[in-house]
Image (cartoon, grey):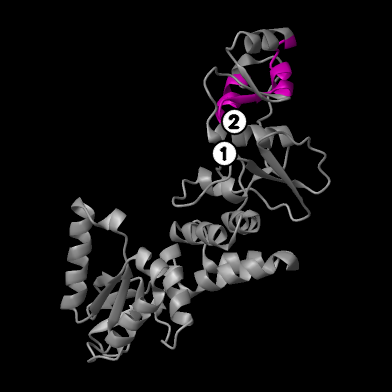
Amino acid sequence: MVRMSPPAPDRDPAWLALIASRQCGLVTIAQHRRAGIADDVRLRRVRQGKWRRLAPKVVIVDSGAPSRRQLAMAAVLHAGPGALVTGFTALELANVPHVRYPRDVHVLVAHTSKVERLPGMRYERTSRLPEAQRLRVPPTAPYARAVVDACRAAVDEEHARSAALAAVQRRLCDVESLRAECAQAARRNRRRLDAVLDEVGAGVRSLPEGELRRAVLASELREPLWNPRVYMADGAFLCSPDGLWEEEGVAVEVGSATHHAFGADRLRTAERAQRMQAAGLMVVSVLPRQLRSDPARVIRTLRAILAGPRRVCLDAPSLIVQRAR
């Protein structure tokens, strides 16, 4: 169990300042009283706008608008010892990009908890309350658990995929830890979790890559390696294409005109393609909008290229391929 505040002598304002610094500027009423701050003093500062009440027994010792981290901390303090941030909220506080975040703060509490539900705060009771991660403020569930909780709470399968793929891409958790966490999930939640885990376990790391994989699996094409690491014979890193057919020496890149069509990004993308081609790989670029509007055409293009002249044999010592982990 995480200790929310260090022990301290009663009626010590300096201790209260330390607590506030460790709790994102938030203090509970019990902590105020322990530090010798009278109730009427606290209430007066709240009425004057110097402090703000974020929950019935939680005050932020500031007059500004609370941040998402402060709102999450308030939800944890309101729930009491053992409460943990999880789900999309944990990923949001870890700055995971390209995910649609719900408005409510998601908090895990023990199944025996009688915490009062508040607007903007979602409390989920569980009989499997995990240990908090070290050095995370507010206390946060392990990211593999947070991803599983996010997938269960997602509005649809694509929303769930975005959470899992982004978390693995940012290396907050790995595939094995997700497998272990999924194995403990309730059976009613397994279908969606298994589908997401299948994609992540294959090496897919983005939603457009997932769309390409589903198009390939629906065709007669053999599935490529997803996001492998390719090295030169001397051990120098060459590239990590989105998809790679080893035997044919064909790499596919699911690019985005938004992110790679201008400035330095465009230059880096072009240079990367040149290095891959110089090493003997054929590089095929596919845009996400092509996958959405006409996946059959993308498959026809890939089929024709894969049936064409062989470019390079990656079983030979010229290039070394390491599967995604």
For label 2, the SS is loop
What residue is shown with label 2?
A: 23
Residue 270 lies in the magenta stretch: no
The label shown at residue 240 is: none
Q: Quadrant of residue 189?
A: bottom right
Find the distance from the CA under tag 2 to the CA under tag 1.
Answer: 7 Å
Which residue occupies 33% across, 66% down? 287
Label 2 close to label 1 by CB (< 8 Å):
yes
Q: Nearer the viewer, residue 153 or 299?
A: 299
Residue 243 visible in the current orientation: yes
Q: Crowdedness of circle 1 by 10 Å Cα count: few (<14), some, many (20+)?
A: some
Tell which circle, 2 or 1, labels the residue nearer the N-terminal end. 2
Q: Nearer the viewer, residue 119 or 202?
A: 119
Q: Amino acid at mark 2?
A: Gln
Q: Crowdedness of circle 2 by 10 Å Cα count: few (<14), some, many (20+)?
A: many
Q: Quadrant of residue 55?
A: top right
The percent coordinates of residue 78 (x first, y second) are: 71, 32
The percent coordinates of residue 127 (x first, y second) are: 78, 54
Which residue occupies 53% across, 56% down? 163
In the rendered image, the residue lying farthest to the front is 293
Which residue occupies 17% across, 65% down? 271
What residue is shown with label 1?
A: 137
Query: In the rendered view of the protein, which quadrant contains the C terminus?
Result: bottom left
Residue 4 visible in the current orientation: no
The percent coordinates of residue 300 (x first, y second) are: 34, 83
Judge from the rendering whether residue 174 lies leftward or rightward of residue 47; answer left or right: left
Range of magenta residues: 16-39
